[in-house]
Amino acid sequence: MTTMTHSNPSPTTSQSAGAALPQNEVIRLSQVWKTYRMGDQDVNALAGVDLSIERGSFWAISGSSGSGKSTMLNLLGCLDRPSKGTYLLEGRDIAQTSDDELSDIRLKYLGFVFQNFHLIPQLTVEENIALPLFYQGIEGADASNKARELAERVGLGERLGHRPTELSGGQQQRVAIARALSNDPSVLLADEPTGNLDTATGDSIMALLCELHNQGKTIMMVTHEPDISAYAQYAMVMRDGKVESISENPPHPSRGGKHA
Ligand code: ADP
Ligand code: MG
């Protein structure tokens, strides 16, 4: 592994609200802090993170418990705002947005995949996949066609009418991935996506994520498993709310593109 120092964002493009990012850069964090008040103590869950994410890159974030991984993913996912610093996503300054704007940004730019799938048990595969479309006002044949297309893309074209309980864990995660893709997000965020799956099923989910990466999707994944981290292009390790290291992984058989 080659350890790299990650680039410091240039101050000329990171300071003003709504500052533009170069087209190939989807995310930029500049001196991002997230501070929680615990009684009379401040806990810095993120402590001055600088990070630049290239469009189409695939990242694994790891680090010991309490190092700030979830805080980082919540922040990247616009579920939260920085206490201090700048987060630019597709050139939009996330610290400066209202709650309503934040939820629009999530719908438009982000897809989420969780360890526990988070599917809606009452809805069919097709309806689960189409849910983000519904929230964007896309319904009827358009939503249905898109959901079918995505179900096929994740290998579940024959399961459209099934409910989550009628599917295996791996199939449920495929549905969740299809749902996360339905708004064609700029960034796919995955929190321990294989955490509830056996090794073989986990590997098949990782092969699917690699395929999406090979097709150009930007992916940020939290994992504590080195075997899973190895699928990503870049391994980021967090410690005490800081990015401790970033290293480029060696080629992986599932990963194509420039790192094949
Ligand atoms: P990880 O996901 O790597 O285990 P977290 O991001 O959950 O780490 O937490 C980082 C630090 O921030 C920990 O010290 C944790 O206790 C603290 N923390 C996280 N969320 C909160 C919160 N809502 N309130 C107070 N402290 C929090
Ligand atoms: Mg966590």
Image (cartoon, helix red, strand yellow):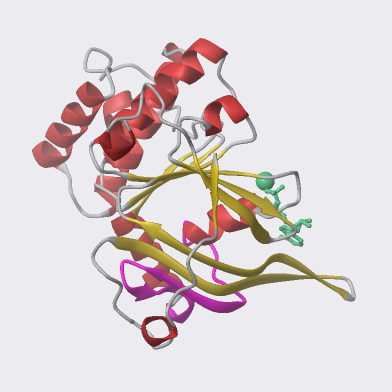
Quadrant location, the C terminus? top left
Residue drawn 33% across the image and 81% down it: 19
Q: Which residues are magenta?
A: 77-97
* Residue 94 painted magenta: yes
- Place of residue 250 in the rendered image (x, y in percent of width and height, measured from the top left): 46, 33
**In the rendered view, does 191 fall on the left or right side of 33?**
left
Which residue is located at x 22 percent, y 25 percent? 153
The single residue placed furthest to the right in the displayed view is 40
Q: Is residue 153 above or below residue 242?
A: above
Judge whether 24 appears above or below 37 on screen.
Answer: above
Q: Is residue 256 magenta?
A: no
| One can see residue 21 in this view | yes
Residue 241 location, x and y as percent?
A: 70, 61
If the image is split into quadrants, where does the N terminus sit?
top right
Hey, which residue is sitting farthest front in the picture?
Answer: 2
Q: Position of residue 21 (x, y in %)?
A: 30, 72
Q: Is residue 165 above or below residue 220?
A: above
Determine the image quadrant of residue 32: bottom right
Q: Is residue 170 left or right of residue 1?
A: left
Task: Residue at 44% x, 73% y: name it.
Answer: 94
Q: Pick the residue in front: 87 or 244.
A: 244
Query: On the picture, is 235 further left or further right than 157?
Result: right
| Residue toward you, 161 or 196 | 196
Q: Residue at x 29, y 58 (%)?
A: 108
Locate residue 128: give its quadrant: top left
| Residue 106 x, y percent position in the rendering | 38, 58
